[in-house]
Amino acid sequence: MKKTSYITLFAFSIFSTLGFAASNNVAEQFEKLDRNQDGFLTRAETAVDPALWSRFSSYDQDKDSRLSLSEYGTYASK
């Protein structure tokens, strides 16, 4: 392989590792907020994060009064 191919491969591996670390961090934050460990966040559980609590309904995409990890990920990625 050419030197540029190795550099490109190395760069891609770094970015994929960083992406995994970021998504893992979101999951860890979610688990800390999920006090009853049911896999969802209620409005009461999000009270420790005033920004999330005040915009809870805008992130609750399916309007079931709880946030899934995916819905929380939308909040955490902003």
Image (cartoon, rainbow, N blue to C red):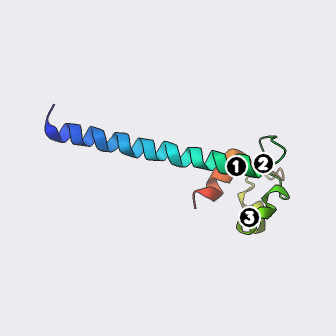
Which SS class for mark 3?
loop
Which SS class for mark 1?
helix
> Is residue 21 something one can see in this rendering?
yes
In the rendered structure, the answer to whether residue 11 lies left or right of residue 41 reads left
Q: Amino acid at mark 3?
A: Asp
Asked whether the residues under the numbered discs 2 and 1 touch, taking CB atoms below 8 Å apart as contact, a structural biologist would say yes
Rendered image: mark on residue 49? 3
Residue beneath disc 1:
30
User: Residue 22, position in %: x, y?
Assistant: 53, 49
Callout 3: 10 Å neighbours few (<14), some, many (20+)? few
Residue at position x 73%, y 62% in the image: 58
Q: Amino acid at mark 1?
A: Phe
Residue beneath disc 2:
34
Which SS class for mark 2?
loop
Q: Amino acid at mark 2?
A: Asp
User: Residue 67, position in %: x, y?
Assistant: 76, 50
Q: CA–CA distance between discs 2 and 1?
A: 6 Å
Q: CA–CA distance between discs 2 and 3?
A: 12 Å
User: Residue 9, position in %: x, y?
Assistant: 28, 38
Residue at position x 78%, y 59% in the image: 46
Q: CA–CA distance between discs 3 and 1?
A: 11 Å
Q: Quadrant of residue 40?
A: top right
In the rendered structure, the answer to whether residue 8 lies left or right of residue 4 reads right
